[in-house]
Amino acid sequence: MRISLILLLLGGFSLGAAAQADPTIVKHRSNCRLAVQTLESGHPGPKTMWAMGIIPTCVEEGGAAALASAIRGLRTSTDTATLHLLRRQAGSFRDADVFAALTEVAGDPGASAPARVYALLAIKSIIYPNKRTTFADATTDFDANGRPRCNRQTTYITDYNQVQGTPLPADFQIRVDELLRRIRADSSTPAMVMAATTCGY
């Protein structure tokens, strides 16, 4: 019995050591550390797009918190290519930190209009992962009567993959509703953000 136990322990140790030594696993962990560092600090800048591309696979390495930092860090950005990727990756995280960062940016009058729109679209993706609304569809102009021209077709998808992180607040839907009401009630809200609160939801 003692010999069997020793062999079992040695076998488990060998498997664990083998997993740690697996070049693929080691490389992935190294990439995740760099991706987290890049999104949290903004450096090295040229790696930002790469980091956002890999971050959904880095849950155990703190990917959600790093993505939340990136969302806040890009609140004044008008780079729609970067914001589009950020929205796509943020929408794939059903996580409280990511959700909080998105609601902060969406409701911040000091954030850029594109960043606020993409934040609203990402929130929608978190709540309704099978629905997609494009930036163009969510930011159509208002007509002469002040109504947004919601010339959109919501795309329904079946092959979405949503990473589960820290659970959302129990009242997350109430928070979203309050956020939308607050944005709509602010007369200084840019037209495209106002349209996104109506057409995007």
Image: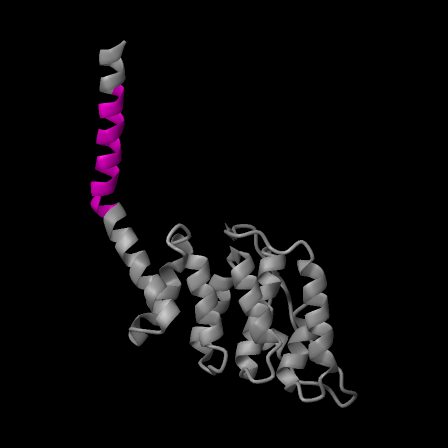
User: Is residue 132 visible in the rendered structure shown here?
Assistant: no
Does residue 164 sit above or below 153 in this rendering? above
Residue 54 x %, y %: 36, 59
Q: Start and end of the magenta stretch?
A: 8-24
In magenta stretch: residue 188: no
Residue 13 x %, y %: 24, 30
Residue 83 x %, y %: 47, 74
Q: Residue furthest right?
A: 145
User: How many marks are shown on the rendered structure?
Assistant: 0
Q: Residue furthest front?
A: 2
Who is closer to the viewer here, 19 or 192?
Answer: 19
Image point 23% across, 18% down: which residue?
A: 6
Q: Quadrant of the N terminus?
A: top left
Q: Quadrant of residue 11?
A: top left
Residue 76 x %, y %: 49, 82
Q: Quadrant of residue 193?
A: bottom right
User: Is residue 109 visible in the rendered structure shown here?
Assistant: yes
Question: Which secondary structure is most common in the magenta stretch?
Answer: helix
**How is the structure coloured here?**
one colour
Does residue 94 sit above or below 114 in this rendering? above
Q: Residue furthest top?
A: 1
Image point 24% across, 52% down: which residue?
A: 27
Image point 58% across, 59% down: which residue?
A: 126
In magenta stretch: residue 15: yes
Q: Quadrant of the C terminus?
A: bottom right
